[in-house]
Amino acid sequence: MCPRQNCCVAALRDLPLLQLLPRSRLMTQPVTLPLWLLLLILAFAAVAALTHVFVPPVRWFFRRRMERLVERLNARLDQPIRPFKLMRRPDMIVRLVHDPEVMEAVVAEAAEKGEPESVVFARARRYAKEIVPAFSATVYFGFATRAAKSFARMLYKVRIGHYDAEGIAKIDRDATVVFVMNHRSNMDYVLVTHLVAERSALSYAVGEWARIWPLSGLIRAMGAYFIRRRSGNPLYRRVLAHYVSMATEEGVTQAIFPEGGLSLDGRVGRPKLGLISYILGGYREGRRDVVFVPVALSYDRVLEDRVLIQAAALGIRRFRARVATILAFVGRNILRKLFGRYERFGFAAVSFGTPLSLREFLDQPHRDAATELARELMSRVTRVVTVLPVPLVAAAFGGESVLPRSELIERAERLADELAKAGAHLHLPDGDARKAAEAGIHSLSLRGILRAEGDQIRARAEDGPLLAFYAASILQLQDALAASNAPKIAKPKSGAT
């Protein structure tokens, strides 16, 4: 032992306490601590015990239950739940932000803005945490689909309009299915979730409106991913694009609204290319096919119709629905329910058109694949819009201020007949256009939009835009069917005169 150590030992032995106690008892003496320090130590010990002893077995137990649930679901679903969808959210975030394409975007933005790469990487990670969902099969199939079914049927008489059973049956079980939909109402999410629940678990692209706590947690658990529709940041767009490409390549069933927002005029709008371009980016020739299924949604009453019309009149896509207005609407319908006077808001119909295989589409030459694909898909959506009583009556009214009841019904019958001959899909009570016209007049009269004056039906002047909103879908459908039924003129061969 060195001289310095001998000195230290001698100094310790000189301490009064150590002189009185034998060496064997030194380790068993009590130590006095403040209460707050003892509680802090116990808290740390409890956390360590939970995270290292109790939590892993509990997590394993629930993971095993979830895996068994997924096995049972995949046995009956047309499109199974893919392993990528079940990946732990932190692992998915790491995989996303460390992808070479994302890292290239991080380096490029750091060089452009003169920021350290670590700062830009942290921003990319924040974007990834914002986008990536946290799918829970229990939440989706145990709560969300049941709640969607109850809520949809409470508000509407839900119907399936056109359904291309043959085309949908041919979809390869291994393909990535993408439902391409028109966007009429925020009820679209609820309606489609309800009707597709027996076939697949959908992954929606949802906008900023859904990032409200605690709604955001529930939406993430349903497998939806959040997007900033108006963000032009290249790094954000690269992170989002790569997430969509990964999900597409891994076979995740998706549902998208190419219009990018609710229709302000009642028509199927022009598509935006963002998500469709990202899906194209995730396609690899010779690997998993991507099959697009056109979906058209129709309503006898769009819950937000007046808000949408006001936004269209102002030319500003900002929906300023007042909380008081919403509460009054809910309160009125609760009272009607209590007094037995509640009526559902007519029909809501969902049509499933002819699927489009991306592999077959790309076998043909295209100048701009994304643009041509988006146009073709939205054209298919437009052609399978279901004709319902209220839009039929609105279109038959034709902008008039007053019509004899008999003439309005005759117009509706004539219009329904023309649409049926052109190939439209109609859902009418008992298949009778006269009953449909009566039902449409009744629904519009309940809202005060139409008013019976003897044998005359008068439209309230201030509700002209509302009738035009519902009529627009029928007028657009007429044009689309006329264009599709028009004889195709063959292009002259090269060198022909």
Image (cartoon, helix red, strand yellow):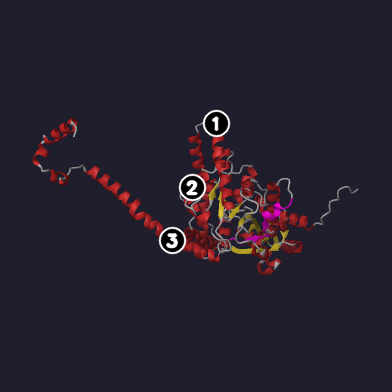
Q: Is label 3 or label 2 in front?
A: 3
Circle 1 residues within 10 Å: few <14, some 14–19, many ≥20: few
* Residue type, mark 2 in image: Ile
First-in-chain label (1 vs 2): 1
Residue 149, image x, y percentages = 54, 62
What residue is at 72 percent from the left and 55 percent from the top?
475
Residue 363, image x, y percentages = 72, 53
Label 3 and label 2: CA atoms lie apart by 31 Å
* Residue type, mark 1 in image: Lys
Residue furthest out toward the right: 497
**Residue on which the image places disc 1:** 113
First-in-chain label (3 vs 2): 3
The region drawn magenta spans 345-364
**Residue on which the image places disc 3:** 64
* Residue type, mark 3 in image: Arg
**Residue on which the image places disc 2:** 212
Q: Image quarter for residue 404? A: bottom right
First-in-chain label (3 vs 1): 3
Residue 271, image x, y percentages = 66, 48
